[in-house]
Image (cartoon, rainbow, N blue to C red):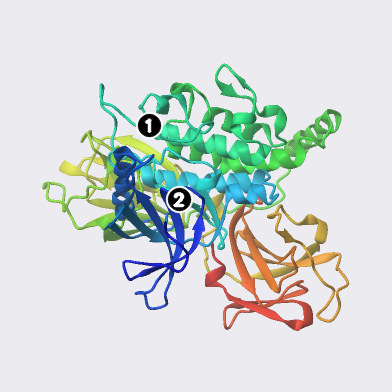
């Protein structure tokens, strides 16, 4: 039996044990060979007793898969070893992520509202887009609150790949049932796990967060969990969750990209708007407002208020860049990044042409079945898929031409076959065509009513003071406006000297958070455009300074 303080393989000093299973142990440990004795997670598995060779096989596969993965929100592989003494032990060492699992947060009383659940869903779906892009897809098979970690950086991490599958089961083969009761879909019990199986588990997990009730304790009808009467969220989110947990595969979202597409960005905005207003506006008032709106539109149509320059160009200039083909972001497993050196050769190029337009980057992928078609994928600045277009006619892109006069983009492929798209068609969010993306535009500070703050995590509070030397609360709070984002500086419920800076997009969705120590109870925000810094001023004039660039989600 391992004990705290012991050193394994003259390198890993055990500090704290998680759980009580003697044959399958997880420890927080220090890597004594690292320069700073960094903290790591050491998983130990012994052979014998209740631990069978199937368990060892899964343990080894977890180590092999982690070695292949490189994602910011998946713990990094560190080491794998065995200890052959009186008892045979296997060890897996991986990156330590500081934070609490969603299960621990539920047990601490944390309540998850619609905004928080959507943010969690978006982050996990992005991780699944990455995992499922492998060929064959890497399937986690055990998504649940205890395997989703809320890091100290407020990002969601997917942990524990002990049930991972990286190949499809063939007919007639034996299999080991893995997963957790309540979160596992029917097809997984039959050994036929597919990417949509992970979506089911995620949907059930989100319902657990909203209802604060384990799925095993929720009622079912026709093999489907009934949760609608237990949540107070928008109908759109309820319908989205309902499709995520459909027992029949054909009624469920097929891929993480599809699930993400119907959740964001447009649909998330609709969710937030419906949640905010649908309960409070009586039908009679809505009818009256609609009457006024229709009348106003007619008036505006008949009365031109602003002279519009018909020759003005609403589009910023797209640019084509050539980047290493290995730098491509994650994409679906049915595609491949295959770029040729020219129209009349099959020789692969080490670089690929990509389109940069505003805040979006566009890659032109070919299909693994070599059909004459391309899949144009748009990514946001954080590498998230926001839109896809399947376009027939060409494959193996080698050049991209932009015609600003005709407002078209041409993707050139093998044998000089081409695919032409209009610039307007390539905009994932049509509202973005009115202004260029300016990452260093001037920030503006506004004072807004305290009560107008958006939703924020339950560990925070909106506490704004009237000045540096008083605890008297102010009826207004300073907020920072930078580009399309609005930043609020929250303090903590436990009154620590720290602020949590939260960035919201134009739809009121949380897109990033920064925990910054040093001050609390914001009363002013100063902008230094020369130094490109923002200073948040709090109690006793303590300050927190952040650079413009750091504040860009």
Q: Residues within 10 Å of mark 1 (few under 14, many from 20)?
A: many
Q: Secondary structure at mark 1?
A: loop
- The residue depicted at 65 percent of the width and 47 percent of the height is 106
**In the picture provided, is 172 more to the left or to the right than 478?**
left
**In the picture provided, is 386 more to the left or to the right than 93?**
right
Q: Which residue is mark 2?
A: 159
- The residue depicted at 71 percent of the width and 39 percent of the height is 275
Look at the image and tell me in which quarter the N terminus lies.
Answer: bottom left
Instruction: List x then y, in percent, for residue 63.
Output: 32, 51
Estimate the spatial distance between the alpha carbons at disc 1 and disc 2, rounded to whole Å.
Answer: 19 Å
Viewer-closest of 202 and 260: 202
Residue furthest front in the image? 86
Q: If you read the primary sequence from the N terminus, does the residue marked by circle 1 or circle 2 appear first?
A: 2
- The residue depicted at 68 percent of the width and 35 percent of the height is 234
- The residue depicted at 68 percent of the width and 72 percent of the height is 498
Viewer-closest of 231 and 300: 231
Viewer-closest of 329 and 131: 131
Q: Which residue is mark 1?
A: 194
Work out whether residue 516 can be spotted.
yes
* Label 1 vs label 2, nearer the camera: 2
Q: Residues within 10 Å of mark 2 (few under 14, many from 20)?
A: some
Work out whether residue 427 can be spotted.
no
245 versus 411 height, above or below: above
102 versus 16 height, above or below: above
**In the picture provided, is 423 more to the left or to the right than 112?**
left
Instruction: List x then y, in percent, for residue 515.
Output: 61, 67
407 versus 167 height, above or below: below
Instruction: List x then y, in percent, for residue 276.
Output: 74, 42
């Amino acid at each position: 039996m391992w004990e705290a303080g012991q050193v394994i393989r003259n390198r890993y000093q055990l500090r704290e044990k998680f759980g009580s299973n003697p044959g399958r142990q997880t420890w927080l440990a220090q890597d004594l060979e690292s320069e700073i004795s960094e903290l790591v997670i050491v998983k130990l598995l012994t052979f014998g007793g209740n631990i069978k060779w199937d368990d060892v096989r899964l343990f080894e596969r977890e180590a092999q898969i982690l070695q292949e993965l490189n994602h910011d929100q998946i713990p990094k592989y560190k080491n794998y070893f065995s200890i052959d003494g009186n008892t045979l032990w296997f060890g897996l060492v991986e990156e330590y992520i500081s934070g609490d699992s969603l299960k621990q947060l539920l047990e601490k009383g944390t309540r998850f509202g619609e905004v928080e659940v959507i943010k969690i869903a978006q982050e996990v779906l992005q991780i699944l887009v990455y995992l499922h892009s492998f060929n064959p897809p890497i399937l986690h098979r055990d998504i649940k609150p205890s395997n989703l970690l809320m890091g100290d950086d407020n990002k969601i991490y997917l942990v524990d790949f002990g049930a991972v599958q990286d190949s499809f089961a063939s007919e007639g083969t034996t299999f080991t049932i893995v997963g957790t009761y309540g979160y596992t879909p029917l097809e997984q019990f039959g050994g036929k796990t597919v990417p949509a199986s992970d979506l089911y588990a995620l949907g059930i997990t989100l319902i657990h967060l909203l209802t604060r009730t384990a799925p095993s304790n929720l009622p079912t009808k026709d093999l489907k969990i009934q949760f609608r009467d237990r949540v107070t969220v928008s109908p759109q989110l309820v319908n989205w969750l309902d499709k995520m947990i459909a027992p029949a595969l054909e009624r469920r979202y097929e891929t993480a990209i599809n699930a993400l597409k119907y959740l964001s960005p447009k649909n998330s905005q609709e969710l937030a708007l419906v949640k905010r207003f649908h309960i409070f506006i009586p039908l009679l008032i809505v009818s009256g407002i609609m009457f006024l709106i229709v009348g106003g539109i007619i008036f505006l149509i008949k009365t031109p208020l602003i002279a519009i320059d018909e020759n003005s160009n609403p589009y910023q200039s797209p640019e084509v860049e050539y980047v290493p083909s290995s730098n491509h972001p994650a994409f679906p497993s049915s595609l491949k990044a295959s770029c040729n050196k020219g129209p009349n050769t099959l020789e692969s190029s080490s670089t690929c042409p990509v389109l940069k337009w505003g805040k979006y980057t566009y890659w032109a992928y070919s299909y693994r079945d070599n059909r004459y078609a391309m899949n144009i994928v748009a990514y946001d600045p954080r590498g998230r898929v926001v839109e896809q277009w399947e376009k027939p006619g060409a494959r193996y892109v080698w050049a991209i031409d932009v015609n600003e006069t005709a407002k078209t983009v041409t993707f050139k492929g093998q044998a000089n076959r081409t695919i032409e798209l209009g610039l307007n068609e390539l905009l994932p969010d049509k509202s973005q065509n009115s202004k260029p993306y300016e990452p260093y535009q001037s920030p503006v500070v506004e004072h807004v009513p305290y009560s107008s703050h958006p939703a924020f995590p339950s560990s925070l509070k909106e506490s704004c003071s009237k000045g540096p030397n008083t605890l008297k609360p102010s009826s207004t709070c300073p907020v920072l406006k930078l580009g399309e984002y609005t930043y609020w500086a929250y303090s903590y419920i436990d009154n620590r000297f720290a602020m949590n800076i939260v960035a919201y997009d134009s739809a009121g969705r949380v897109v990033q958070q920064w925990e910054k120590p040093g001050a609390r109870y914001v009363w002013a925000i100063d902008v230094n455009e020369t130094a490109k810094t923002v200073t948040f001023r709090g109690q006793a004039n303590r300050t927190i300074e952040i650079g413009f660039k750091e504040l860009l989600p």
